[in-house]
Image (cartoon, helix red, strand yellow):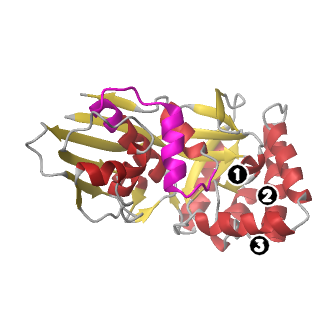
Amino acid sequence: MIRASAPGKVVLWGEYAVLRGAPAMVMAVNREAICTVNPQVDGAGDGWQFESLGFESEPACLGREELTGGERPPESSAAALAWHVLQTINHTALPTGGRVITDSRLFYEAGDKLGIGSSAAICTALLGSFAAVTGQPPTYAAALAAHSRAQGGRGSGIDVAAAFHGGLLKFQNKKIEAAKLPAGLNMTFIWTGRPARTRDHLEPFSQWLETADLTPLSVLRETAESLFATNDILRDLSRYTACLKVLDNVAGLGIYSPAHKHLEHLAKACEVVYKPCGAGGGDVGVAFGDRIASLEDFAHAATVAGFRLIPLEKAEYGIRVTR
C-alpha cells in the first residue's frame, strides 16, 4: 500500500492581487488530505476503483486506458482528479488496476467544507501516490499542471504551493520562497458558517478585469508587496483590508459577506485586524493581533455571536509519501 498526504492552506494576504503578479503570503495548515493506493499485479486487476471520504464523489471504476487517456470523467470526482494527474506524469508503468481511497474529512466541519484548499491537497496527494506507483518522484510542476487542468486554468496555484511544500510561503507567479511572519504577530481563525465556491468570485473578477479601471487592483498589489517589508504589520494589514474592501465594492466580488462584515466589526472593538482568507464570501477568516489578550477577547465575542473558532496551525511539512 502507498500512502500520500498533503496539507491544506490559508491565504494570509495577497488574494486577487496574486492573480496579477503580486506576492501573497500563504500558510500550509495542519489539516491534510490522504490518498491510499493498493495497486494490483497486471492481469489480476479489474480496473481502478475509486472511493472518497469527505469530498463528495460517487465510487467509480475506470480501466487503465480510461484512466490514462480516455474521455475525462465527471469533474466532481476523485477519479477526475486522478485522470488529470496521470496526464501530467509518465504513466507507462501504471498497473491495470488497483484501489484508491481519498480522505479529506479534516477539511470539513459539521458537514460544511471549510475552504482551506481541499481540492489542491487531494490532487497533490493523488500525484504523490500515482508517482510512487509508477516509480517516479512527485514534482511541484506536475502538481501545478494537474490542478490547473482540473480547475480549467483558473486560480493562481497558491494552494498547490502550500500543499506541495508546506510551511509559510511567499508566492508570486507560481514561484515560492520560504517566509516568516513578523515577531509577535498572532492569529485566530474563524469559520463564517457558510461555505463558498472560489469560482463564483473568480469569474466576475475576470469579467471586471476586461472592462474596468484597474486602479483599485494596482493599489491592492502595492499594499500586498509592502507587507513583506513592513515595520508596522498591523497598520499595514489594516491598510490592506481597506484596499481589499475597495476592490470588492467596485468589482462586485462579494468578498465581504454579512458574516465577514460582522466579524470585522467585532475585531475593531477588540483592537485586532480581521480579513477574509482567500476569495471570501464565506469560508474562513483570520484575525491578526500583537496581544494575545486582544485575540482572546475577539474569539470570545465571535463565539458569543455564533461563529466557530477553527484551530489551525502551520504545517511544516508538504507532500509526504510512504509505502
Residue 77 visible, this orientation: yes
Element type where label 2 sits in the image = helix
Callout 1 environment at 10 Å: few (<14), some (14 to 19), or many (20+)?
Answer: many
Residue 146: x %, y % from top left: 48, 46
Looking at the rendered structure, the kind of residue marked 1 is Glu
Residue 153 among magenta residues: yes
Disc 3/disc 2 C-alpha distance (Å): 12 Å
Residue 178: x %, y % from top left: 63, 26
Q: Name the residue under label 2.
A: 244
Whether tag 3 and tag 1 are in contact, CB under 8 A, the answer is no
- Above or below: residue 202 compared with residue 128: below
Callout 3 environment at 10 Å: few (<14), some (14 to 19), or many (20+)?
Answer: some
Find the residue positioned furthest to the left.
44
State the quadrant of the N terminus.
top left
Give the camera-side residue of 3 and 64: 64
Q: Name the residue under label 3.
A: 252
Give the camera-side residue of 215 and 74: 74
Disc 1/disc 2 C-alpha distance (Å): 9 Å
Q: In which quarter of the image is residue 268?
A: bottom right
Q: Tell me what residue is drawn at x 31 percent, y 30 percent.
A: 132
Element type where label 1 sits in the image = loop
- First to last magenta residue range: 129-155
Q: Name the residue under label 1.
A: 15
